[in-house]
Image (cartoon, rainbow, N blue to C red):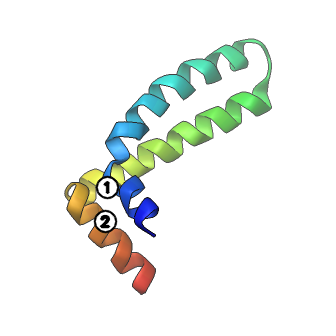
Amino acid sequence: MDAVYFIFKYIPFWGVPMIFILVPTGYIFWTKDRKAISAILFGLSGFCIALLAFWVWAGGPTRAVQAFESIINH
């Protein structure tokens, strides 16, 4: 469970680079008419954006882990 806490604590350090990688790559696949692949990539980038919003809403690294624990325990 420590790995999950680590992932939630440091969401900005992996979420932002993932967005910068996934969005342009999804756009390249979209222009090459590979709509399914681009949809997956855009969906993953949307998931990263949602996790970043959760991290900000929770109040930072420590509170993000606490919020995740409270969601799991309820």
Secondary-structure class at tag 2 = helix
x, y percentage for residue 58? 25, 61
Image quadrant occupied by the C terminus: bottom left
Q: Is residue 22 left or right of residue 38?
A: left
Chain-order first, disc 1 or disc 2: 1
In contact (CB < 8 Å): disc 1 and disc 2: yes
Residue picked out by circle 2? 65
Q: Nearer the viewer, residue 54 or 6?
A: 6
Secondary structure of residue under mark 1 = helix
Query: Is 33 left or right of 64, judged from the image as shown?
Result: right
Res 70 quadrant in image: bottom left
Please rate how many residues cluster around mark 2, counting C-alpha atoms within 10 Å: few if below 14, some from 14 to 19, many from 20.
many
Per the image, the residue denoted by label 1 is 9
Graded by Cα atoms within 10 Å as few (under 14), some (14 to 19) or many (20 or more), the crowding at tag 1 reads: some
Q: Amino acid at mark 2?
A: Val
Residue at (25, 51) in percent of width and height: 56
